[in-house]
Every structure is written in C-alpha cells, then in structure tokens.
Amino acid sequence: MRKNMKKIILIAIVAVAVTVACRKERTCDCTITNTAVSSAGTATTSKTVKTTIDKQKKKEFREINQCYDYTAVQTKSVGTATNMVTYTDDYKCEVK
C-alpha cells in the first residue's frame, strides 16, 4: 500500500513539473508585408508586430496568435470595374 502511494505521488510530481516547465513567456515576432498591385503600379509597405504573453505552451501560443508564415490575397474592383487591385499580405512569423 505504501509503495503504491509513493508511486502515485511521484508520478503526480513529475506530471506537474513537466506541465509547468512547458509553460513560459512566449513572443511572436511577425514581419507583415502589404503589397497592392493595380494598373497604376505597385505599392508596398512593411511593419513588424511583436506579441508577448506569459505562461504559454508553444503549440497553443502559435495557434491562438496565428504565429506562423502565411499569405493572404484579395482582389477588389476599385472605382471602375476595369480598375482591379490585388492586395497581398505576406506574414513571416517566428515564436521565440
């Protein structure tokens, strides 16, 4: 009986230690490049966004804050129907 209790306590301590060790301050650094292309030309802007949250698991932090590389493309008609503008948002992100 005592051996079983010791094993259970030891397993519980290890489980808590592993859970706590995985949670720490996480930072997401993203560089976002916005490009607009039309018949009039191309315009590009860029900005850096940094998000820091304490006590986070890496995978959960990455998903909740969308901290991964991706590209979003959208085409719109601006003014006349023949003036089409394509907007591209390129996200380059890294969890630190």
Image: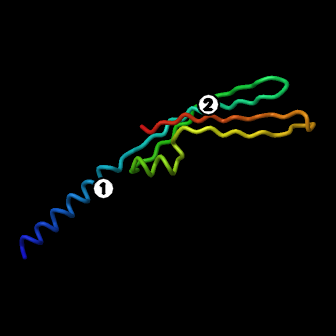
Q: Earlier in the sequence, mark 2 or mark 1?
A: 1
Q: Report which residue position mark 1 lands on.
A: 19
Going 19% across and 63% down the picture, which residue do you hit? 11
State how far apart marks 2 and 1 are (Cα): 35 Å
Q: Quadrant of the C terminus?
A: top left
The residue type indicated by label 1 comes to Thr
Tag 2 and tag 1, C-beta contact below 8 Å:
no
Q: SS class of the residue under badge 1?
A: helix
In the image, 73 versus 2, the foreground residue is 73
How many numbered markers are drawn?
2
**Element type at mark 2:** strand
Quadrant including the N terminus:
bottom left
Query: Residue 10's image quarter?
Result: bottom left
Residue 81 location, x and y as percent?
91, 38
How dense is the environment of label 1, judged by Cα within 10 Å: few (below 14), some, or many (20 and up)? few
Q: Position of residue 28 (x, y in %)?
A: 48, 39
Q: Point out residue 44 in the picture as x, y percentages from the top left corner.
A: 70, 26
The residue under the point 47% across, 46% down is 62
Q: Residue shown at 30%/54% (left/top)?
A: 20
Q: Amino acid at mark 2?
A: Lys
Mark 2 lies on residue: 47
92 versus 18 height, above or below = above
Q: Nearer the viewer, residue 16 or 90?
A: 90
| Most distant residue in the left direction | 2
Residue 22: percent from left, percent from top: 32, 49
